Amino acid sequence: MSKVLEAKQAVVEEISGKLKSAVSVVVVDYRGLNVGQVTELRKQLRDAGIDFKVYKNSMSRRAAESAGLEGLNEHLTGPNAIAFSTEDVVAPAKILNDFAKKNDKLEIKAGVIEGQIASVEEVKALAELPSREGLLSMLLSVLQAPMRNFALATKAVAEQKEEQGA
């Protein structure tokens, strides 16, 4: 086998491994962004622990097929960059969606959320979810509400008895 073919197979295996191990993947079209904007986007993604790479579409298609994500192939046309996250499901969608709002040249094309192909609308809906900390604080608030209401009711009864006794 030639060295070029071996190198291409290694890249396909790398992409396939990333697709299989990632909890979320977002495919974007970065056409029209200047170097400064791409650098800023890469920095934001790197700070969140997200791998952001540009691969040849032919290699990405083969990797998607070997990972069982054939539906992603229709979105792998034109200049694409792929963001892989192995830890946080929401982070790549949130960062890329926020960046796309500020820079209309960045276009979200598709995604993979926990092994399922996601449309642009689904990726954007995921991006609009509150952060993990925000969701936990909402849950805590819901859990505290009954205790808070019980305490207020008990206090009101105590004050009423105090007024009747005086």
Image (cartoon, helix red, strand yellow):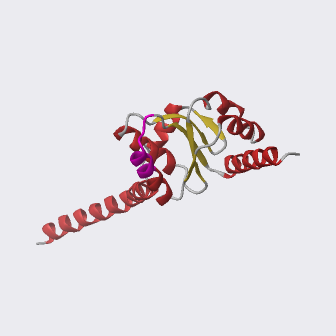
Residue 159 relative to residue 128: left or right: left
Q: Residue at x 49, y 44 (%)?
A: 93
Q: Residue at x 60, y 30 (%)?
A: 75
- Where is residue 53 drawn, in percent x and y? 58, 48
Q: Is residue 30 above or below residue 134?
A: above
Q: Is residue 5 above or below residue 61?
A: below
The boundaries of the magenta stretch are 32-41
- Check the image and name the residue furthest to the top: 74
Q: How many marks?
A: 0
Is-magenta flag for residue 33?
yes
Q: Residue at x 65, y 35 (%)?
A: 57
Is-magenta flag for residue 149?
no
- Check the image and name the residue furthest to the right: 1
Most foreground residue, 24 or 30: 30
- Where is residue 141 drawn, in percent x and y? 38, 57
Q: Is residue 12 above or below residue 151?
A: above
- Where is residue 70 drawn, in percent x and y? 72, 32
- Where is residue 38 drawn, in percent x and y? 44, 46
Q: Residue at x 44, y 56 (%)?
A: 139
Residue 134 visible here:
yes
Q: Main secondary structure of the magenta part?
A: helix
Q: Is residue 148 above or below residue 131?
A: below
Residue 69 visible here:
no
Q: Quadrant of the N terminus?
A: top right
- Check the image and name the residue furthest to the left: 166
Q: Quadrant of the C terminus?
A: bottom left
